Image (cartoon, rainbow, N blue to C red):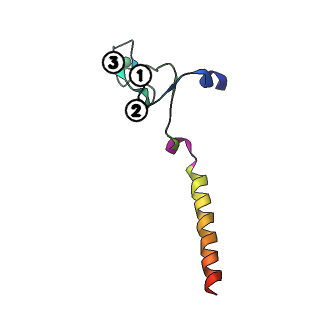
């Protein structure tokens, strides 16, 4: 299944698809991959911005560790 997804065309924010059911041209990037009128799913994989792909728990954890180290350095320099 994952191989099928990798073979599909990535639909970026400029890619538009015409729905065969209601002849509406839409951009799957902004509609979650589906036609906004009938829910028709376009062929291809819809690209996601990196802000949606990233796991923000790890970003917050790394930020917390970095701030902790910075605080420790500040405290030891002040001593
Ligand atoms: Zn449609």
Give the residue number, with chain letter if any, for mark 1. 39
Q: At x 52% / y 42%, what residue is drawn?
A: 50
Ligand 1 quadrant assignment: top left
Q: Which mark is residue 24?
A: 3
**Residue 75 sits in quarter:** bottom right
Where in the figure is residue 79, as x and y percent of width and height?
A: 64, 87
Q: How far apart are the alpha carbons under marks 3 and 2?
A: 14 Å
| Residue 67 percent across, percent down from the top left | 58, 68
Q: What is the magenta range?
A: 51-55
Label 1 lies in ligand 1 vicinity (Cβ under 8 Å): yes
Which tag is nearer the camera, tag 1 or tag 3?
3
Indicate yes or no: mark 3 CB to ligand 1 under 8 Å: yes
Q: Position of residue 46 (x, y in %)?
A: 50, 28
Describe the element under mark 3 as helix, strand or loop: loop
In the picture of the structure, the residue carrying the numbered disc 2 is 30
Label 1: which secondary element: loop
């Amino acid at each position: 299944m994952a191989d099928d997804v990798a073979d599909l065309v990535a639909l970026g924010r400029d890619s538009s698809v015409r729905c065969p059911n209601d002849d509406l041209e839409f951009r799957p990037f902004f509609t979650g991959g589906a036609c906004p009128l009938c829910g028709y799913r376009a062929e291809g994989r819809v690209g996601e911005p990196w802000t949606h792909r990233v796991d923000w728990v790890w970003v917050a954890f790394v930020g917390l560790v970095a701030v902790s180290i910075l605080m420790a350095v500040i405290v030891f320099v002040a001593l």
